[in-house]
Image: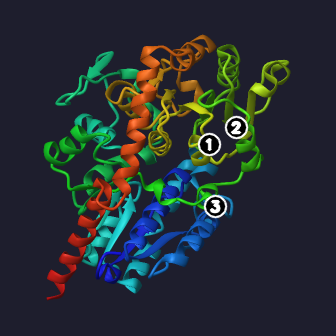
C-alpha cells in the first residue's frame, strides 16, 4: 500500500452504460487497493450492477469504496421510470436524445455532491464533458476516461473529433508510425449521428483540453508507439493503468463482473471442459451491438461451416433468426447463450482458441490479457480503429472484411457466411501464420499481467498519478 495515499479522495463517474461502468468500477478498486479513498457515482437503477463487486472488494481496503447515487430524471425527459442505462435505449433514436438530455441534467446533483464531499480530483467519463465545469468551479483536477486505446485516441486526434464529411474513398492516417488506411465507409458519418450526439462530440473536444489529463485502460508494452504519439505528438497528459480487469483475481469477482444471463456460468464452463484445448471459437459482440436476423443467420452458417466448436453469446431481443434445423445439425458442437456470459472466465479457459469480437476496447483488452487471438467484426464507434490495431499493428487477429460503420443494421453491408468461415479457418485451421498470431497473443497476455504487478508499467504509472495529485494538493494547501 502506498504511504500516505489514503489521504487522497477521488470521485469516479462513468456514463451509465455497461461498457463504461465496468472498467471504471475496476479502476476504483485499483485505486482503493493503493490506499486512495474512492467514491463511485452512478444512479439508483445502475447500482445493483456494481454493488456486489464493490461490496466484496471493500473487505480488504483501508478506505471502502463509497457508492453515491444521483437521481436520474427519467420522467422529466420523457422516459419511463427506471430507464437509466444506455442499453435500454439503443434501438430508438428519440429515446437516445432523451437519455442524453437526462445525463446533462445530472450536472446540478453532481455539483452538489462535489461541494459536499470536497474530493481532491474527479475521474469522469468522456461522455460527461460538463464535469470539467464543476471541477473548475471547485479548483480540482478533472481526469478524462475514454475507455479505449492509445491507438484509437491517436486516430481521433489525427482526424479530429468531428465525423468525416466528404473525403476520398479511403484515407491514410497522417503522422502515424505504421501505415494505417481506413475506408471512408468505416469512419463515422454525420448522417449516422442524432443531433444531440453530434453536439456532444463538439463539447467533448472543446472541454477535454481544459481537463487535467487522460487515464487510459491500456499498458505501455501493448502500444508504445501510440502512447508516445498521444503524449508527445498531440501534447496530452496521460497515464496508462490497465488492463484494469486484472483487478478481478478471484473466481467470484470474475463471475460478478456484469449482468447475469439465461445460462448459468457453470454451464458454459462445464461445456468448455469437454472440449479440446484451443479448439473453441468464443463469439461475443458486447452489450450495445444490434444485429439483424439476416446478419445472425450468416454468422450462424459461418460457424456451422467452419467445423470448429463454438460458444456464441447472442444479445436477447431478436427472434426467428436461426436457420431451419440448425440446432440439430450443430448438436453439441455449439453452445448458444442468450444475454450474458462470464467473458473473463471463458476467455481464460484452455479450450478457447480464438475470440470473435466487435472490437469494443473492453473486450479487445480482455482478449489480449487472456492471450487469445481474435477474429474481428467491428460495427461502429472506434471499433474499426481497434480492428486496425489488432490486425495490422499487433498482428494477433484476422478480419472478416467489414467495410461499413453503422450502429443500425440498415447502415452496413451484410457480411456473408463465406467471409466468416474464411476468417475462422485462417486462424483455427493451423499453419505458420496462425501459429505466429497465437504465439504473439500469448506473449502479449504475459506482458499484460506483468504490467499490473508491482513494478510493472501500469502499476508504476498509477503510482505516478497518485503522487502527482497528492503533490498538487499539498501545493494548494500551503
Q: Position of residue 75 (x, y in %)?
A: 63, 64
Instruction: Decide which of tag 3 and tag 2 comes sooner along the chain.
Output: 3
**What secondary structure is found at the residue carrying circle 2?**
helix
Tag nearer the camera, 2 or 1: 2
Q: Is residue 317 visible?
A: no
Q: Are marks 2 and 1 in contact (CB under 8 Å)?
A: yes
SS under mark 3: helix
Q: Residue placed at 74% from the left, 28% from the top?
A: 334
Is 281 drawn above or below residue 117 in the view shown?
A: above
Q: Nearer the viewer, residue 460 or 129?
A: 460
Q: CA distance from mark 1 to mark 3?
A: 14 Å
In three-dimensional space, the C-alpha distance between marks 3 and 2, rounded to whole angstroms, equals: 18 Å
Q: Residues within 10 Å of mark 1 (few under 14, many from 20)?
A: some
Q: Quadrant of residue 63?
A: bottom left
For label 2, the crowd category at 10 Å Cα-Cα, with few meaning under 14, some 14 to 19 and many 20 or more, is many
Look at 60% across and 34% down and name the residue there. Answer: 352
Side (left or right) of 174 relative to 110: left
- Say which mark, if any, is on residue 283: none
Q: Residues within 10 Å of mark 3 (few under 14, many from 20)?
A: few
- Which SS class for mark 1? helix
* In this view, 175 is above or below 121: above
Q: Residue at x 14, y 46 (%)?
A: 232
339 shown above or below 189 = below
Give the residue at mark 2. Answer: 272
Q: Residue furthest bottom?
A: 478
Which numbered marker is on residue 346?
Answer: 1
Image coordinates of residue 117 in percent, x first then y, are 40, 84
Real-space Cα separation, disc 2 to disc 1, in angstroms: 8 Å
42 sits left or right of 447 in the view: right
Residue 252 disc label? 3
Amino acid at each position: 500500500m502506498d504511504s500516505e495515499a489514503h489521504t487522497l479522495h477521488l470521485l469516479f463517474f462513468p456514463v451509465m452504460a455497461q461498457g463504461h461502468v465496468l472498467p471504471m468500477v475496476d479502476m476504483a478498486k485499483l485505486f482503493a487497493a493503493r490506499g486512495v479513498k474512492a467514491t463511485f457515482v452512478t444512479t439508483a437503477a445502475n447500482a445493483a450492477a456494481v454493488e456486489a463487486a464493490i461490496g466484496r472488494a471493500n473487505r480488504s481496503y483501508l478506505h471502502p469504496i463509497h457508492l453515491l447515487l444521483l437521481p436520474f430524471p427519467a420522467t422529466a425527459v420523457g422516459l419511463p421510470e427506471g430507464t437509466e442505462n444506455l442499453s435500454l435505449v439503443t434501438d430508438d433514436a428519440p429515446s437516445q436524445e432523451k437519455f442524453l438530455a437526462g445525463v446533462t441534467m445530472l450536472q446540478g446533483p453532481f455539483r452538489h455532491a462535489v461541494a459536499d464531499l470536497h474530493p481532491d480530483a474527479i475521474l469522469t467519463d468522456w461522455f460527461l464533458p460538463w464535469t470539467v465545469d464543476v471541477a473548475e468551479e471547485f479548483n480540482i483536477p478533472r481526469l478524462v476516461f475514454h475507455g479505449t486505446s492509445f491507438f484509437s485516441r491517436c486516430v481521433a486526434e489525427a482526424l479530429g473529433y468531428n465525423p468525416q464529411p466528404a473525403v476520398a474513398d479511403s484515407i491514410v492516417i497522417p503522422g502515424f508510425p505504421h501505415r494505417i488506411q481506413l475506408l471512408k465507409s468505416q469512419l463515422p458519418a454525420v448522417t449516422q449521428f442524432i443531433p444531440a450526439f453530434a453536439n456532444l462530440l463538439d463539447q467533448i473536444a472543446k472541454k477535454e483540453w481544459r481537463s487535467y489529463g487522460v487515464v487510459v485502460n491500456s499498458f505501455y508494452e501493448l502500444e508504445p508507439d501510440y502512447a508516445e504519439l498521444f503524449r508527445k505528438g498531440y501534447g496530452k497528459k496521460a497515464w496508462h493503468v490497465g488492463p484494469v480487469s486484472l483487478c478481478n483475481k478471484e473466481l467470484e469477482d470474475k463471475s460478478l463482473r456484469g449482468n447475469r444471463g439465461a445460462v448459468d456460468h457453470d454451464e458454459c464452463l462445464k461445456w468448455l471442459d469437454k472440449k479440446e484445448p484451443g479448439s473453441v471459437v468464443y463469439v461475443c459482440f458486447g452489450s450495445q451491438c444490434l444485429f439483424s436476423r439476416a446478419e445472425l443467420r450468416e454468422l450462424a452458417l459461418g460457424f456451422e461451416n467452419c467445423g470448429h466448436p463454438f460458444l456464441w453469446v447472442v444479445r436477447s431481443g431478436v427472434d426467428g433468426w436461426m436457420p431451419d434445423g440448425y440446432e440439430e445439425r450443430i448438436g453439441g458442437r455449439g453452445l448458444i447463450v442468450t444475454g450474458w456470459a462470464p467473458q473473463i472466465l471463458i476467455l481464460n479457459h484452455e479450450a478457447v482458441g480464438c475470440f470473435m469480437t466487435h472490437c469494443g476496447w473492453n473486450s479487445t483488452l480482455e482478449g489480449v490479457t487472456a492471450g487469445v487471438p481474435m477474429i474481428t467484426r467491428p460495427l461502429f464507434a472506434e471499433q474499426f480503429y481497434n480492428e486496425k490495431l489488432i490486425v495490422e499493428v499487433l498482428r494477433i487477429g484476422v478480419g472478416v472484411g467489414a467495410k461499413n460503420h453503422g450502429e443500425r443494421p440498415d447502415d452496413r453491408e451484410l457480411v456473408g457466411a463465406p467471409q466468416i468461415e474464411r476468417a475462422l479457418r485462417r486462424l483455427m485451421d493451423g499453419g505458420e501464420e496462425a501459429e505466429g498470431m497465437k504465439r504473439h497473443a500469448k506473449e502479449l497476455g504475459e506482458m499484460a499481467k506483468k504490467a499490473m504487478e508491482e513494478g510493472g508499467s501500469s502499476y508504476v504509472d498509477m503510482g505516478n498519478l497518485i503522487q502527482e495529485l497528492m503533490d498538487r494538493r499539498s501545493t494548494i494547501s500551503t
